[in-house]
Image (cartoon, rainbow, N blue to C red):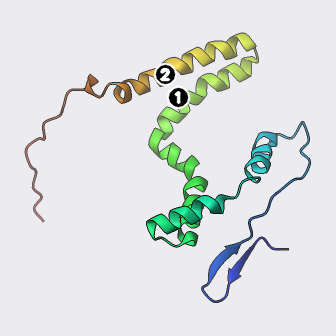
Amino acid sequence: MREVEQNPVEDEPTITLTRWREPIDDDDRHANFKSEVQMYGLLDPLVTLRGMSANLDIPIGAIARYVLAKWATGGSGGLLELGPVMTRRLWEPIAAAEREDSDERRLATYHQLRQMISWLNVPLDDPTVYPAQEPGPASTTTI
């Protein structure tokens, strides 16, 4: 059984929303995600999508496509927002703690990350921390 099929009329993919109830092994490294798939599978997402479709006058398929695309690209979007340099800076203390493999180091890493993220939150918590910038002189380009 194929889960995604091409709709020959519109050449758009068609997906069957299914509930997944397979047993999950305790040692499965994806157990948390699989558990969430099962838990959220109990809900009917079309209730929300139908309401949005009716209220916004947007076809339900367009909203479903948007939701799926936005969720599926969230990781790369997060990387773009945070940036590769900061992502690596935040990961390094975690990697060091895992190499040391001690709970004491992991706790110290938590405090280090808390401080780093607190620093990143400063302008979000207090936008006045940086003075307003005056626009500089207009630049012109001659071609």
User: Which one is earlier in the sequence, the residue at label 2 or at label 1?
Assistant: 1
Above or below, 49 against 98 in this view is below
Residue 103 percent coordinates (x, y)? 74, 14
Residue at 50% x, 40% y is 84
Q: Are marks 2 and 1 in contact (CB under 8 Å)?
A: yes
Q: Which residue is situated farthest in the top direction here?
A: 104
Q: Which residue is situated farthest in the bottom direction here?
A: 9
Which quadrant does the C terminus fall into? bottom left
Which quadrant does the N terminus fall into? bottom right
Label 2: which residue? Answer: 116
Above or below, 10 against 89 in this view is below
Q: Which is nearer the eye, 107 or 31?
A: 31
Q: CA distance from mark 2 to mark 1?
A: 9 Å
Determine whether, in the image, residue 21 is placed left or right of residue 33: right
Disc 1 marks which amino acid? Arg
Determine whether, in the image, residue 16 is placed left or right of residue 137: right
Residue at 89% x, 36% y is 27
Above or below, 11 against 29 in this view is below
Residue at 25% x, 25% y is 128
Label 1: which residue? Answer: 89
